[in-house]
Image (cartoon, coloured by chain):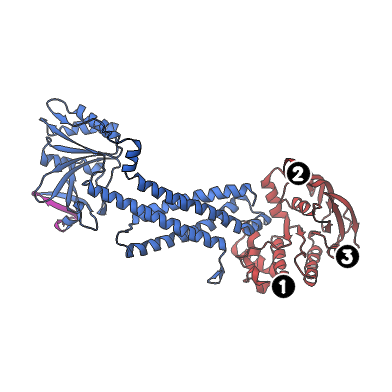
Amino acid sequence: MKVFGKKIPRGNLLIYFSFTVVSLCILLIVSAVRAENVTKLIKNSLYSGHQKSFTIINSEDEKQWENVIPDIEVEYEHFAIYVPMRSSDVALRGVYVNGDIEQPPMLSGEYFDHSTAWTDQRKAVLGKNHEKDVSVRDGKKYYRYNDTDYEVIGIMGTKEESRINQMVLIDFKSAIGIAGINTRYVLDTKNEANIYDIGQKIYDLFTYPAEVLIGLQEQNDSTGLAAYLSGDMIMDTMYVMILISFSLSTVLITFIWFRFRRQLFYAWKLSGYRKCPVCLEIAKRFYVIAGAGFVAGIILMFIISNIVPDVDIVFMDVCRAFGMTLGLGTLILCFCYVVNNNKKL
Amino acid sequence: MIRIENIVKTFGKKDAVVEALRGISLSVREGEMVAVMGKSGSGKSTLLNILGGMMSADGGTYLYNGKDVNFKSQKELVKFRRNEIGFVVQYFALVDDLNVFRNVALPLKYQGYSRKKITKKVMETLASLGIEDKAKAYPFELSGGQQQRVAIARAVVKSPRIILADEPTGALDEATGEEVQKIFRTLNENGKTVIIVTHDAKVAEKCDRIIYVKDGIVEGSSETGQNGCHKGGSV
């Protein structure tokens, strides 16, 4: 087959189509997982799903958290503490973040990290419905709540109307300033096992007369298989299985590609190519075709996302899919090269 | 130039061992044009592959210009093949999706030549073989004779001292085969040492000397009386 006067080897076409399909599959999975996480976050009111509510009572020191937080930070990471507040006009919530936690979908700017959540400067992340209330001063955006200005560091939201669009998140210290230390909190951890340890630590660190009301018994209401089947594990397993199936077919196709390219490898051998140039030439040829397949996968994904409203793709999905496809492709190439090299093709 | 002694090569394992070469010894002088003749399975192609460093021997010694060729080092074999040997095989071994120019340029890649120098060398080689007008053609667009010329061009473009040809006329008709044979003679007259493996007596007769191989050993040799420049090779 000739394209623009250049002959395209059959093996290259196979690799190209294979990577188009694998890339599309990875893009769909990445996009679906992200959408699933967002839906879960929305359903759980921005909590990850492993969170624990607790209340502090009788504390006489409004700054007691400033003694407690550093002690927890030293021992644990990847957790957040939220301060849900009742407000008639906005869904307001204070946020403390340490490490990597579930983040809402951001439309612009950044979500809270440790430096912006645990600060004496007032910071806010707004739901997109509040973007119209933002004012700009000295190149910075501000949101005014109860006659106090908060610097807006990011705008979050979803395409469809959701609770996230209505929320206003502010830094932890500002939230304590509004709600007072004796209030209800939500502890949210990335790793479910940590929730009880961090909860216990908070319980221990708030000393008399302050008291922490928190239930620290682990709930085991479902056993092994039931827990497995009740969770999102079925979908996740299915995604992994689909990916494995496509990857195996790509392995097979890469083997076929190596077979079709025998002529070239023999010509290299006759010409006295060293191992390094051979590897370089193989990698160059393979990545160019796989890359073209990936680009075709992205184009197809864009077409699908324009036709099907439920499928949506963002730049991060493309980056993640690229990383996964590159990793998968490299793994397959190395495996096939080693096997073929042993056969002395 | 080339001297091999008691070269042994076996294939397969346990019960299925095949002894392709059973202690073969021969020598070829610089500038000679030698034919290696024998029936199918006599070990002549294996011999050629060992002479060209495409394959390592299981035993014996291989002296090239008085120096031992180290079969244990793949790196050295590759270097030897790259610098000293030009291969021509029966079915040309051209790469279908590369045009003639790129096929011929293959051995020059990674040799430190500039693009300009590669173009010059390739075009000169193609011109010397009368196929410079086919530079942009793909192998499948050429006749058998033209394809073999391209294969020869690829073998000689890096200026090796030895040309090894495995049944170079086997896939060609008689007239084309003769043309190819003439090319080898010209290369030989220009100073290249040429070793041709063939089972075609007509091809062998046009060489300076014929070495007969049978069951993995040299059965004998004969001078042909052709007008080669450098006579005197001996088994």
Q: Residue at x 22, y 34 (%)?
A: A69
**Neighbours of disc 1 within 10 Å: few (<14), some (14-19), many (20+):** few
The magenta segment is A132-147
Which structural element holds mark 2? loop
Q: Where is residue A35 in the image (x, y as percent from the top left)?
A: 30, 53
Q: Colour of chain A?
A: blue
Q: Where is residue B178 in the image (x, y as percent from the top left)?
A: 80, 69
Q: Which residue has dot 1 on it?
A: B130
Q: Determine the CA span between mark 2 and mark 3.
A: 42 Å
Q: Which residue has dot 3 on it?
A: B227
Q: Which of marks 2 and 3 is nearer the N terminus?
A: 2
Q: Which residue has dot 2 on it?
A: B17
Q: Where is residue A84 in the image (x, y as percent from the top left)?
A: 15, 42
Q: In the rendered structure, which amino acid carries the disc numbered 3?
A: Asn
**Neighbours of disc 3 within 10 Å: few (<14), some (14-19), many (20+):** few
Of badges 2 and 3, nearer the viewer stands 2
